[in-house]
Image: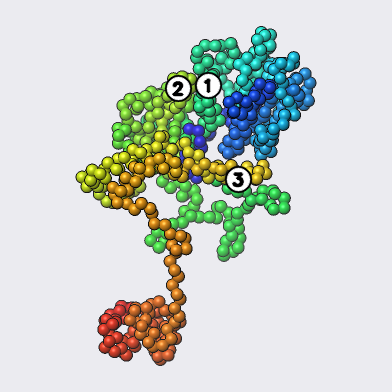
Amino acid sequence: MDLLLDDAENEYAELGAESDKEIPQKDCVLFIIDAHERMTRRSHGEPSPFMQALRGVINTMQDRILTGDNDMFGVLLYGTKKAQVPNDHQGFPHIFLLQELDLPSAESISKLNRLLESKEDPAFGHLEAHSSETCDFSNVLWVTSMIFNTSKQAKQTRRRAYIITDNDSPTGSSSSPRQQAITRACSFWREIMSKVRTNYKGTADAQELELLNPENLSDSWVHSAVCFSEDELASRLKRRSQRKRILGRLKLKINEDTEFSGCMVSMIRSYAKPPAIKLDAATNEEIKTHTMRICNVHGTSLQPVDLWRGYCYGGKWILFEPWELKALGREDSEQGLVLLGFKPRDRLKLYHNMKPAGFWQPLETRAGSTVAVEALVESLHKKERFAVCTYRRSTSEVRLVALLPQPLQLDPNTNSVVMPCGLYVIQLPFAEDIRELKLLPSMTESEFTPTELEAAHELVRSLKLAQAPVGTVPNPLMHKHYAYLRAVATHESDTKPTVDGTLPDAIFLEERRGPIRRFMEAFNLPSEAPTSSASSSKKPKAEKIGPPQSTADWKELWQTQGLTSQTMTTLKSFLKELGLPVSGKKADLIARIQEHLLAEATDADTLLLGNHSLIATELAS
């Protein structure tokens, strides 16, 4: 439910209803990185925590460029020798704004890469541990608030701040700096929530109350706020970055008096290389295109009202106006989901899934919809049934769909939502959509020898993958495309090699060479496939033969049935030499030549030829 399906392939892209008014989805992310000298120490030959943090920032910015989001990023360092804050404010020592809030670009990524590759000490410097000067963490939070408030681009965005440090107590052991940091954090949170509440009217939830009370150390708060592994942290960040995409509102009608409000949520999006934008070669400005249709008769430009759609039926054109064609087949159907009945779940087959499924979630636009749908989903799940409905949106024809229940699933450790409560919308085929395939009958086990069966079983067991590759293999086309774009934008000499997960694993196959060899020996398969070069695989071009020059050549063509390969010009020239008529189609010309050659043929020619008078008669007819 994270990715958006392309409009050309998504049956739920246009629902004809008012889309949900949500909080702006644009993020404004500020990475606050500890730059003390201890963060630059390497351990066990691995990069220092400071370099790992910068590398993580670079990867995050590159991922956002790939996803096409207009999120902004900034990098703030604390614990530096030099100070640099927005608008050159004084009184904030050891805080350095490395990168202001802005859209991720090739220049910003290149700047961070140069900092990673540089072997010299950076210009901002690192504050040493034994130094008498310290960095007040409350000032870091104050500067963070200042950056968000002074940036014009950060308005009407969701503000996020990630603090990266190896110190569990950045405020130190003293209680006074700690209390100042807590007070500043609470003020910072209230400031953010005051801006969010202008667009979202509601009561403070449990998460807000917990953040307003940072001293909450209960087990439930620790489990919800602390990540115990890198995989859990990556999964949590992915859920936050890949937001739920609501395509539009769609009601579920049970009967004439009962209906529930809900929305369609996108589930998956297939990657397509973005189209290249045409630019003016002189100014690099985007070229605007304008399409105009011209009448063939009068030469005037045609407006949309002048265009009709037509179908040829029985040799007659049936014409429709655009609005008539759109309304065709939708007269007796109601927009939305209309319940028809229920079926056992085992009646739904895998081949019934016509297109990518959608996901329907309840909304409280109509009071009580959420509770009622949860009860419906729970009942369908327990009884192992699915609902059959008619589905129609404002711009499509009526379809039959199956609604599969999806109960609410929570993570037992973090209590976060793994799968929300809702209904999968699966399009069902009509009777004309199902095709019966005439396949060869499958072979039975008795038709194989025990050696062949054992070899086949061993091959299947040895080539079994550890995990299903669906959703885990990166798209090599996308990575190569953006790798070349990034190399050109950042003036890199070469690109990093892209790992193509769709290719066979040579090491994996080499380790299983034994079962593969025994399988090939059991079925008498060749050890090596026949290879041929590109030049040898092509058929040699046949030598071009010229037109017949003598009567003997014409007789040879006649006996080998090659008269049809001659052109009309060659046939007419030969008939002119014989003084025969040259009118008619090609079959008539060949028939005259065959009759002439048959009349002059000897007995030997007749035996070689056979009865060609029938052929001449068929060609003439």
Q: Which residue is mark 2?
A: 411
Which badge, 3 or 1, is on the more N-terminal residue?
1
Q: Which residue is mark 1?
A: 227
Q: Determine crowd level at label 1: few under 14, some 14-19, many 20+ residues with C-alpha closer than 10 A.
A: some
Mark 1 or mark 2, which is nearer the start of the sequence? 1
Which residue is located at x 58 percent, y 11 percent? 215
Badge nearest the viewer, 2 or 1: 1
Where residue 273 appears, as percent x and y from the top left, is: 55, 46
Tell me where residue 574 appears, x and y as whole percent.
42, 86
- Of helix, strand and loop, which one carries label 3? helix
The three-letter amino acid code for the residue at tag 3 is Tyr
Instruction: Return the disc, 2 or 3, that comes first in the chain's sequence.
Output: 2
Mark sitting on residue 247: none
Which residue lies at the image location 32% right of the left edge and 29% below the top edge?
A: 384
Q: Residues within 10 Å of mark 2 (few under 14, many from 20)?
A: few
Residue 83 in the image, given as x and y percentages of width and height: 76, 24
- Is 614 or 324 nearer to us in this picture? 614
Label 1 element class: loop
Residue 294 figure quarter:
bottom right
Between marks 2 and 3, how big is the CA–CA gap? 40 Å
Hey, what amino acid is under mark 2?
A: Asp
Residue shown at the point (32%, 90%) measured from the top left: 600
Disc 2/disc 1 C-alpha distance (Å): 13 Å
Depth order, front residue of 291/131: 131
Look at the numbered discs 2 and 1 and tell me whether their residues touch, using CB distance below 8 Å.
no
Residue at the disc numbered 3: 484
Is residue 309 or residue 356 the one in the foreground? 356
Tell me if mark 3 has few (under 14), some (14-19) or many (20+) residues whose alpha carbon lies within 10 angstroms of its own: some
504 horizontally vs 199: left or right: left
Furthest residue in direction bottom, as rendered: 579
